[in-house]
Image: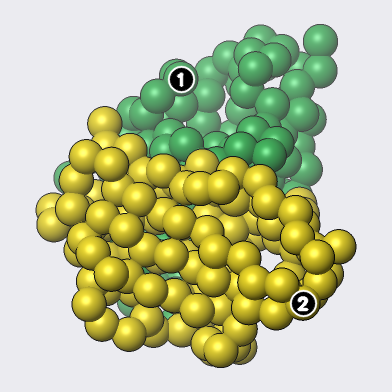
Amino acid sequence: GAVVSQHPSRVICKSGTSVKIECRSLDFQATTMFWYRQFPKQSLMLMATSNEGSKATYEQGVEKDKFLINHASLTLSTLTVTSAHPEDSSFYICSASTYTGELFFGEGSRLTVL
Amino acid sequence: AQSVTQPDIHITVSEGASLELRCNYSYGATPYLFWYVQSPGQGLQLLLKYFSGDTLVQGIKGFEAEFKRSQSSFNLRKPSVHWSDAAEYFCAVANQAGTALIFGKGTTLSVSS
């Protein structure tokens, strides 16, 4: 089956720094990619939807200047958490949609901000 | 707006016993429905999905789910639970294929010996 790879799987950073998380579709072109956030023992909350070459669409309550999303190619989307703070610590998961509408999830990236 | 309700936060089942996890959705048209499983610290694994057709859907690992439009439900079932099934289970809905999923809050399954 199709594979979506996220990197890094775990990252620890100091408060105030920026962290970039990559989401790659390894064997297919993703028309759309989605970014979710999951707090411990909670559900996945959709943060934003991104289409290749266009600006991401953010869900209500998600700070677009805080969570920068770039979808530069049909196989790569990046999420940059800018000026990270401890409350940004979370599990971030991406998913990618194929032209036929199938959806595949990455393995997730755990961010810990000290 | 779409929403998904998983009424049971935590369920404990004896190994070998049957399992049913409940999921109710709110959506005007026929939704696209999914069940995912997540082990601690891991990503999501798709168990099964329903788009149209036969309302009883077979998935991986011996799971099945039944779409009941009249009850707006998509409950997940397994006839005999194994200890390895202990995990977090999420029901999700989308309004069409390839669009963002809206997830329920999840049900934690514990399996006792």
Q: Is residue A54 visible?
A: yes
According to the image, label 1 marks what residue?
B61
- Quarter of the picture containing the C terminus of chain B is top right
In the figure, the shade used to draw chain B is green
Residue A52: percent from left, percent from top? 23, 71
Is A42 on the left or on the right of A45, as rendered? right
Q: Is residue B72 visible?
A: no
Badge 1 amino acid: Lys
Q: Which mark is residue B102?
A: none
Instruction: Rate crowding at label 1 as few (under 14), some (14 to 19) or many (20 or more) other CA atoms within 10 Å.
Output: few
Residue B43: percent from left, percent from top? 55, 41
Residue B27: percent from left, percent from top? 39, 73
In the figure, the shade used to draw chain A is yellow
Instruction: Rate crowding at label 2 as few (under 14), some (14 to 19) or many (20 or more) other CA atoms within 10 Å.
Output: some
Are the residues flagged by discs 2 and 1 in contact, CB closer than 8 Å?
no
Q: Is residue B30 above or below residue A8?
A: below
Which residue corresponds to the image point at 75% horizontal and 22% vertical from the top-left?
Answer: B111
Q: Picture quarter containing residue A69?
A: bottom left
Q: Which mark is residue A16?
A: 2
Q: Chain of mark 2?
A: A
